[in-house]
Structure formats: C-alpha cells, structure tokens
Image (cartoon, rainbow, N blue to C red):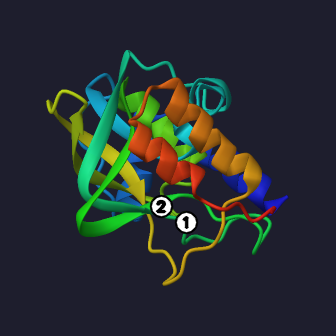
Amino acid sequence: MFWTLRRAARRAIARSWLLSKLWYRFHGLPLDGAPDDEVWYFAFGSNMHDDVFRGRRRMNPREWRVARVAGYRLRFNLEGRPRGRAAPANIEPCPGEEVWGVAYRIVRRDLLRLNSTEGIPGGYYRPIRVAAEDADDRPLPAIAYAARGGETDGNPSLRYILLLREGARAHGLPDRWLEKLDRVRPADE
C-alpha cells in the first residue's frame, strides 16, 4: 500500500511544473528550462523497447535515433525485484568503453513523467547529462539515468534482458552491441 501511495504521489507531482520544481529542489536536483523545451533522453535499458517506452511509460517521442555514449559501460549492478532474481541495467563511467542505446527527443514535461515512472527523484536512479552521439557521429546532449550500484553485477531476469535485446534489434543497434546483449546470462537460467 505504501508503494502504491508513493507512486501515485510521484505521478501527481509530475503533472504540475511548479510542484515538480519544489519537489526536485527538496531532493537536491535541478529542474531547468520550461515544460515545452525539447530534450534528448538516452535509453539503454528496457526503455529501448517500444512496449515499455511508448506503451507502459506512455511516451510519444518526436524523434528517435540510434545513439552511443562514450566513456561509460553497461552494468547490471542494481538490486531488482524479486531480490536476487533480477538486476536492472545501469551505466557507470569507464574510459575506453561505450554504451549503445536509443536517444528519444521529448519535451521536458514528458521527461518529468518518465522520471516519475523510474522513481526520480528519490529512487535508485538520478538523471545525469551525457554526451551522446547518433550513428552519424552528430552530438546529442542527453539525459540518462544512472545509480550508485554494487561492486559486482547480478543477472537480469529473462523477461528484462529480452526487452533489451528486442528493443535494441527493433531500433537497429550495431551487431557488436546485440552480440554483447546476447551474452548476458539471465538469472532465470
């Protein structure tokens, strides 16, 4: 019941720009710009999948592009649900590495709603600014989600890693990235 109320409160706050600014300030996060400003959001986890991003999250991006973020690596070092049986995706700085995903162009008001579905502010993830580039090496300053994860990686659930693999394939991510995702062993095996 507590989690349901907390989720409902987070969604209600996300509908009001003024309440959101206050809520973000309370959590020490900046909320810059105007509600209709466009931003790029870099998805590397289940939000790459249309059923999640457009369906469950109810996002309607104005545009999407295959993108990468250099200097980061993909991790599965967060505790998911059920505990010990799922590890959500995360990114962390790592020179020489890169993470591929999907960059979506959305308005800031939609980013607030997306944040609320990811537990921001107050959950695992925090929005970070990343220097993404599309497949043609054009810069896309973007927002991504990162968290302070554990030292060791866990295993994502089979359902979760399938969302990543299917989303990556549907958006045409590079073969080497698809192969990397195919090598991730799910917890359900």
Relative image position of residue 176 (x, y in whole percent): 40, 45
Relative image position of residue 55 (x, y in whole percent): 66, 25
Give the vertical position of 159 relative to 107 (above or below): below
- Amino acid beneath label 1: Phe
Q: Does the residue at mark 1 contact the one at mark 2 (Cβ under 8 Å)?
A: yes
Looking at the rendering, which quadrant does residue 101 occupy? top left
Residue farthest toward the bottom in the current orientation of the protein: 151
Which residue position holds label 1? Answer: 76
Residue farthest toward the right in the current orientation of the protein: 1
Give the vertical position of 13 relative to 150 (above or below): above
In the image, taking residue 136 as reference, residue 76 lies left or right, namely right
Looking at the rendering, which quadrant does residue 167 occupy? top right
- Residue 99 visible in the displayed image: yes
In the image, taking residue 30 as reference, residue 17 lies left or right, namely right
**Number of disc labels:** 2
Kind of element beneath mark 2:
strand
Relative image position of residue 43 (x, y in whole percent): 44, 41
Kind of element beneath mark 1:
loop
Q: Mark 1 or mark 2: which comes first in sequence?
A: 1
- Amino acid beneath label 2: Asn
Which residue position holds label 2? Answer: 90
Measured Cα–Cα span from mark 1 to mark 2? 6 Å
In the image, taking residue 71 as reference, residue 20 lies left or right, namely right
Of residues 33 and 127, which is closer to you in this image? Answer: 127
Of residues 1 and 100, which is closer to you in this image? Answer: 100
- Residue 15 visible in the displayed image: no
Pick the quarter of the image with the C terminus. bottom right
Give the vertical position of 86 relative to 62 (above or below): below
